Image (cartoon, grey):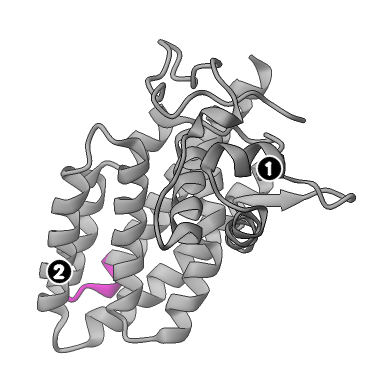
Amino acid sequence: MSTALPAASARARSEGGRPGRAGGLRALGSIDSQTRREHVHARLRDAISSGELAPGTHLAEVELSESLGVSRGTLREALRHLQQEGLVSADARGRLSVRVVTDREVGDIFAVRRALESLAVELVCAAPEHVRAATRLREALGAMRGTVGDFPAQIQADMAFHELLCALSGSETLVRSWRAVSGLTRAAITAAGPETALHNMAAERHLPLVDFVEAGDAAGGAEFLREHMHDAATRIVARMQERGGA
């Protein structure tokens, strides 16, 4: 499936929360930087996260490379990174498209995240520095509040909060495992659309978790995460089904 892309300047959503339909791949705009691959990767990831590049959109190399003002080699590197993250998938002929996640995958993604983040909470709460860890998490919540109005930035801030929780555990293996599903989490968020995502990513929804960490209450934190992840997955799946039936 190949879908026309909205222009980069047309991120405003329609009343129904769907991205506009004007423009095409060439409207993404040129990138002039020494770190082109990173900028291309960030530009495309933002476009996918915001819904500007809708799930199922075919990513044509020629059109994209011309639009972004980079070589096809640079573009391929960025697309390969997105594929490793789970945001882009290849069909049987090797053609790349924005990843389309299924209802079952959403449940799996959030179940794995719950297991990983519950372990992180257990490790953080067992550490003598758990109060200091809570302070850093509160700072991350402040960063989340500061991104209101910028949907891609809100997704990034939400993901950064959860990654920080894992990093504070001191387990590099846990962090690597969490990062392995972070791209799929972004794909699931995108599939549900901004309205559902904004509810799930609200800073205030995360505040009780910080309180549990500060108190050193691993059991309370794990129970909170069970409910938090279940609620997020349920809302995403419900919204995906509504959109599929629209």
Name the residue rendered at 20%, 70% in the picture.
213
Q: Quick check: 110 left or right of 124?
A: right
Q: Which residues are magenta?
A: 216-220
Name the residue rendered at 53%, 44% in the picture.
69
Mark 2 or mark 1: which comes first in sequence? 1
When the figure is inspected, residue 81 is found, relative to residue 49, above or below; the finding is below
| Quarter of image, res 112 | bottom right
In this view, the residue in front, 20 or 110, is 20
Q: Secondary structure at mark 1?
A: loop
| Residue that numbered label 1 is attached to | 102
Report the quarter where the C terminus lies. top right
How far from the left and from the top, in percent, is residue 82? 59, 56
Q: Secondary structure at mark 2?
A: helix
| Residue that numbered label 2 is attached to | 136
Name the residue rendered at 24%, 60% in the picture.
209
Q: How many marks?
A: 2
Name the residue rendered at 66%, 53% in the picture.
72
How far from the left and from the top, in percent, is residue 17? 44, 19
In this view, the residue in front, 198 or 66, is 66
Report the quarter where the N terminus lies. top right
